[in-house]
Image: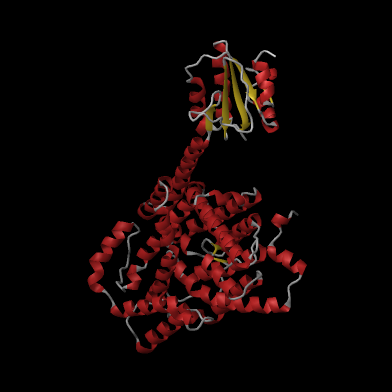
């Protein structure tokens, strides 16, 4: 098996892990497990599913991703990025539809890993990632207003503007107890660790608010009042009921889950690499992520990926091997088995406060602001993706964002391709190439192409060369700096050759790379231009042009 497909844990075990490292990682795993508990519950509730679905996902995905992934310190589980898409699927297709979409997404992610596409995901523009991440943050923030203010709205609309309209209609029913609990939770989550570093503020807030609400019978919504008991056991794994029509409808959401999960997972791995000076294996990481989603969905779980915040918490607390991630999952399992009956007493306003902090950290407002000061193309991608995510749908936002980014990239690439007439000196009198002074015969035009000759640049290439007012006897097209040519580029090249041949103008191609020569045969260039006029050296091209 190639190294890129060997899980990090296997390599580390082979190398040997010291007892000190195991102890340190176990302690980090305990802390991360405690941090993950309220997040797993909150993400599940915000996604429109019962609380235990988030815990089950964190346990199963956490173990699989750490055991078989390509990162030393990655922590897997449910994340805020999935809330929007999961909520939409559940509302339209129910839990069965979510299970099918997550199951399919798992196989898609595995396919990406097996195809070695892990490294290609890094080419997705940062402005696109910030756009939909900030959009998700705003939607998470909006989804928590009901519980944060204790408005007790039974059915909150999914549409962004409808949601806020309903909120404004009910702001006269604010439960100030809920607001106080949520506000204290936000403050403790943000600032508690400045005083006691090893204890997460969110856990302290949950414990205090749950005890106070129970002891003093404070009238606020709790998990129990809205969702009933939290089971302290796993449901048996089962395959979802599948029909072809539902699968067709869920293909797009499944691809969105796969793409979103892959991006966030690999981003988390890259961030953690920079923190520990390591290097993850992207392809095996994707395979583990895919397997985690498949298995988790069979147990009724929700989509999972690498969690940036929990991974960073792991690193900061000394985690350096996948043992920490495995321990984190086992801690969650222990809590579920032993303390699930008490978790039902947690106030929803407390969880809303925690998610408000998650939304703030996800918003990436500093990066958003920075991109807005950049070039117009990045701004267009950022704002388009952001508003599509908020107003319409995350799936649409990702699809259009990628297409738009591709067009922007092609536009930039086409602008970077230079096609210059270098027969004469520049206006300033300086020769364009100081390293060589070419003695061109009379009635010979020399063009230099610099950059890939692909479909985005083909029209510019064709227009520049054919729109000359000078009628030469020979035209030399120098291509020493052309790394690749696509089908459109070859078609344009052949049309130029035919056009000049009709006017009795000899065409010579110079500086053709060896890597392109086999493609010339495949794309029919030799059928329109004799091989003697396709040379490797400019001096040879000039000799032929002069009749030598």
Counting from the top left corner in percent of width and height, residue 281 is at 66, 58
436 w.r.t. 218: above or below: above
Counting from the top left corner in percent of width and height, residue 262 is at 56, 55
Quarter of the figure with the C terminus: top right
Counting from the top left corner in percent of width and height, residue 105 is at 55, 54
Whether residue 96 can be seen here: yes
Q: Residue furthest front?
A: 429
Query: How many callouts does the rendering have?
Result: 0
Apparent side of residue 10 relative to residue 324 in the rendered image (left or right) = right
Q: Quadrant of residue 357?
A: bottom left
**Who is closer to the viewer here, 87 or 451?**
451
140 w.r.t. 537: above or below: below
Residue at screen point 25% across, 65% down: 168
Counting from the top left corner in percent of width and height, residue 361 is at 44, 66
40 w.r.t. 132: above or below: below
Residue at screen point 58% across, 76% down: 317
Apparent side of residue 517 relative to residue 198 in the rendered image (left or right) = right
**Who is closer to the viewer here, 521 or 422?**
422
Quarter of the figure with the N terminus: bottom right
Whether residue 530 can be seen here: no
**Who is closer to the viewer here, 467 or 146?**
467
Q: Quadrant of residue 363?
A: bottom left
Q: Which color mode does the image show?
A: secondary structure
**Who is closer to the viewer here, 293 or 407?**
407
Apparent side of residue 132 relative to residue 33 in the rendered image (left or right) = left
Q: Quadrant of residue 290?
A: bottom right
């Amino acid at each position: 098996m190639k190294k890129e497909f060997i899980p990090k844990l296997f390599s580390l075990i082979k190398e040997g892990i010291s007892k000190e490292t195991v102890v340190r990682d176990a302690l980090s795993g305990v802390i991360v497990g405690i941090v993950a508990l309220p997040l797993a519950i909150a993400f599940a509730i915000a996604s429109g599913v019962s609380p235990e679905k988030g815990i089950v996902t964190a346990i199963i995905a956490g173990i699989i991703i750490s055991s078989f992934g390509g990162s030393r310190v990655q922590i897997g589980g449910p994340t805020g990025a999935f809330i929007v898409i999961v909520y939409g699927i559940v509302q339209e297709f129910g839990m069965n539809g979510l299970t099918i979409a997550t199951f399919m997404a798992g196989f898609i992610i595995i396919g990406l890993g097996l195809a070695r596409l892990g490294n290609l995901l890094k080419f997705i523009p940062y402005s696109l990632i910030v756009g939909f991440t900030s959009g998700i943050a705003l939607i998470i923030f909006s989804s928590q207003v009901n519980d944060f203010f204790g408005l007790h709205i039974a059915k909150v609309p999914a549409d962004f503007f409808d949601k806020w309209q309903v909120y404004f209609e009910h702001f006269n029913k604010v439960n100030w107890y809920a607001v106080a609990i949520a506000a204290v939770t936000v403050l403790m989550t943000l600032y508690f660790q400045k005083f006691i570093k090893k204890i997460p503020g969110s856990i302290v807030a949950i414990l205090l608010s749950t005890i106070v609400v129970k002891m003093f019978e404070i009238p606020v919504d709790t998990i129990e009042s809205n969702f009933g008991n939290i089971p302290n056991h796993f449901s048996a794994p089962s395959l979802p009921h599948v029909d072809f029509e539902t699968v067709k409808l869920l293909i797009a959401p499944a691809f969105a889950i796969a793409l979103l999960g892959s991006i966030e997972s690999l981003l988390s791995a890259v961030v953690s690499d920079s923190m520990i000076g390591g290097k993850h294996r992207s392809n095996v990481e994707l395979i583990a992520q895919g397997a985690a989603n498949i298995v988790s969905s069979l147990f009724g779980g929700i989509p999972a990926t690498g969690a940036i915040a929990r991974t960073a918490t792991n690193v900061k607390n000394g985690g350096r091997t996948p043992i920490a991630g495995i321990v984190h999952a086992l801690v969650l399992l222990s809590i579920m088995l032993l303390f699930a009956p008490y978790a039902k007493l947690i106030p929803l306003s407390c969880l809303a406060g925690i998610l408000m902090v998650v939304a703030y950290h996800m918003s990436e407002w500093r990066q958003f602001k920075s991109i807005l000061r950049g070039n117009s193309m990045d701004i267009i991608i950022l704002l388009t993706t952001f508003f599509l995510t908020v107003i319409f749908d995350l799936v649409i936002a990702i699809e259009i964002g990628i297409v738009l980014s591709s067009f922007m990239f092609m536009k930039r690439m086409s602008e970077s391709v230079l096609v210059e007439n270098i027969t004469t000196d520049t206006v300033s009198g300086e020769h364009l190439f100081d390293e060589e002074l070419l003695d061109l015969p009379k009635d010979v035009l020399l063009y230099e192409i610099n950059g890939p000759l692909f479909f985005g640049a083909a029209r510019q290439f064709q227009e520049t060369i054919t729109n000359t007012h000078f009628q030469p006897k020979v035209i030399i097209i120098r291509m020493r700096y052309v790394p690749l040519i696509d089908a459109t580029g070859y078609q344009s090249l052949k049309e130029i050759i035919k056009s000049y041949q009709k006017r009795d103008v000899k065409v010579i191609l110079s500086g053709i790379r060896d890597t392109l020569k086999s493609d010339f045969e495949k794309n029919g260039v030799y059928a329109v231009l004799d091989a003697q006029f396709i040379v490797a050296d400019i001096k040879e091209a000039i000799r032929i042009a002069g009749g030598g």
